[in-house]
Structure formats: C-alpha cells, structure tokens
Amino acid sequence: MTNEIKERVFSGVQPSGSLHIGNYLGAIKNFVEVQNKFDSIFCIVDLHAITVWQDPEILGENIIEVAAAYIASGIDPDKATIFVQSQIPAHAELAWILNCVSRIGWLNRMTQFKEKAGKNREKVSVGLYVYPNLMASDILLYHANLVPVGDDQKQHLEITRDIAQKFNNDFGRVNENEFFPLPEPMILPVASRVMSLRDGEKKMSKSDSSEMTRIEFSDENDLIVKKIAKAKTDPLPMPSAIKELNERPEINNLINIYSAFSGEKIEEVINKFEGKKLSEFKSDLCDVVINEMEPIRFRFKELKNDKTYLKKILHDGMLKAKEKSDPIINEVKSIVGLG
C-alpha cells in the first residue's frame, strides 16, 4: 500500500498590524479547511512586512499574534506547517536568484506596487518594488502546487508562474523535466476581499489609522456592535436584488461579511432582509460575527499569553519547513552553478 502524495499549498499572513476579520475571512478561515486535504504550509511572512518600516519591538509581538490567530482559528500545527519566513534563510537566498531571473518590465506592470507607492514612487524601498520576486520565492521554494489568492494577489501569482517558466527555460528544465512546477490559484469558497467599514471601495487594512474601519481579533463584543452600528451605509432601503449591490459598495460589503460568517449565499441574505430595516440587518450581522469570533477571541488572547508554547510551535514548524525546502534550494544552487 502506497501513501497518497498530497498536493502542496502555500500561503502566508503579514505580521504588520492588528489582525482583523479581513485577514480571517480572506485567508485564515480557509486555511482551516485546506489543512485537512493538502500538504499545507502557512507562513508568517515577516520579510514582506519590512518592505515598509516596522517598529522592531512591535514586529516581534505581531509575529506572535499571527501565530496565535492561526491556532485560535483552528489551524492544527500537527496537520500544517506553521513557521516564520525569516527563520528559513532559503527564502531570501532564492529571492535573490529569482531577482536575477525576473525582468524589470514585469515588475513595472505590477498594479499593487503602483497603488502602494502612489506619488512617492521614487522614495519607497527597493524591497517593496521586488516584493513579487520574494513572494515567488516563498511559493517556489516548496514546489507548491496551489496558492490561495484574492483579487489583489492574482497578478503576483501570474508573475510567479512567469518567473518559474523563465527559470525552467533558462536552465533547460522544460516540459516533463520542469524543475519548478507552475503553481495554480486556489479558488476559495469565501469572498477574499473584505472592505473597510468606513469606505466600501477601500480594502480593510491593518494600517488604517482608524480602528473603526475594521473588526479586530481582540475586539470585545460591545466594540464589535459599536463598529457595525457606525459602519457607513447609504440612505436607501435594504436591496432587493444582487444587481443593486454594484452601485452600493458599503451595503455590498456588509452583506458579503454576513454571507461569509453565516454561510448563506448572497442571494439568500438579500431575500432574508428585503424590506427590513437596516438596523435589523446590522443587529443580525453583529450576532453572526460575534457567534464565530467570540470563541476565537477567547483562545487568541489565551494563546498570546503563552509565548513559550507559541515559540515551540514556530520552532517545530521551522524544522518541518527546512526539511521541505533544503533539498529544493540546494538543487537550485546546483542548477545555476552556485554549489
């Protein structure tokens, strides 16, 4: 009897601020299901976080917070590999090799860099510019087959595939002899893009100056109720059809959040609240959010106070990640003539 070889999934969360339901619904909630079906690698991508300046002391706390959120949400360190990106030097080693494979023109087309850099493009870090190459390194270092991606990350996966293909072509590894497999996007059941509670056209963000724009893992129930009550909407009644949502970004966002937490389809949510008061919808939205987040918050806070346990989980995960990545980085070096 042979053991079934599972497809490998790679994903990660940046430790760059207070985690919120956007991180949970867009990534972590899905990881819990993924770990049961795939060889799952869930990284805390601290090297990505420092592409913009981070307070060193706070960064260390944020790394612990992401680990706590992973486990509180249901990720099992015995099923999945949980580790800190910077503890595996091969991420940075492979990223440099891929910097030498990737093309300037590819990076110039990356829309997320343009959005983040804005008018200060000449003043942002080189790290932010070559961020896609590091992301490619994260994925390719483990020969991951699948990558969960939201709308804002699809372009990064495309450039990862381009880099992998160019590496294979440059070093004679094509068709059945490809060294790097071309990773495919993993289609997730939950809408991956959760928007700000104050602006339905802006992604919910850890870096937003106002905490009222997001519901955080650590928020108590009364604060969740307050944030949802004050969430921006429009003066129109609850929608009666999906097509109305295109012109109503704030109510569209709240309905998406309700759908993601309740498990009900968008159409079902619209039918359920058609003709009802907005206050009634918001009250029910509070209930579905609190119902799921309250036990997670309790465990999250408990884990944050047990750093010894979390550091052991991350150390064990680092050893597992090293076991998976060492043969690949060693072969890459051999292929390109570095050893």
Image (cartoon, rainbow, N blue to C red):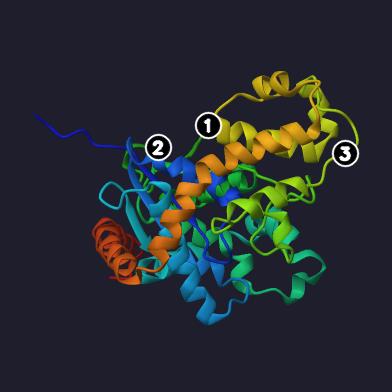
Q: Which of labels 3 and 1 is toward the front?
A: 3
Rendered location of residue 28, percent (x, y): 48, 47
Instruction: Tell me which label, 1 or 2, sits earlier in the chain.
Output: 2
Element type at mark 1: loop
Rendered location of residue 72, percent (x, y): 41, 52
Q: Are marks 1 and 2 in contact (CB under 8 Å)?
A: yes
Element type at mark 2: helix
The Cα–Cα distance between marks 1 and 2, rounded to whole angstroms, is: 10 Å
Q: Which residue is mark 3?
A: 234
Residue farthest front in this picture:
222
Instruction: Tell me which label, 3 or 2, sits earlier in the chain.
Output: 2
Q: Which residue is mark 1?
A: 189
Please state which amino acid type lies under the numbered disc 3. Asp
Q: Is residue 15 above or below residue 245?
A: below
Characterize the local packing of mark 2: few (<14), some (14-19) or many (20 or more) Cα atoms within 10 angstroms.
few
Please state which amino acid type lies under the numbered disc 2. Glu
Task: Give me the residue at 53% from left, 40% from top.
Answer: 291
Q: Does residue 246 appear anywhere in the picture?
A: yes
Q: Which residue is mark 2?
A: 33
Tell me: 278 left or right of 130. right
Tell me: 161 left or right of 82. right
Instruction: Tell me which label, 3 or 1, sits earlier in the chain.
Output: 1
Characterize the local packing of mark 1: few (<14), some (14-19) or many (20 or more) Cα atoms within 10 angstroms.
few
- Quadrant the C terminus occupies: bottom left
Characterize the local packing of mark 3: few (<14), some (14-19) or many (20 or more) Cα atoms within 10 angstroms.
few
Rendered location of residue 135, percent (x, y): 50, 57
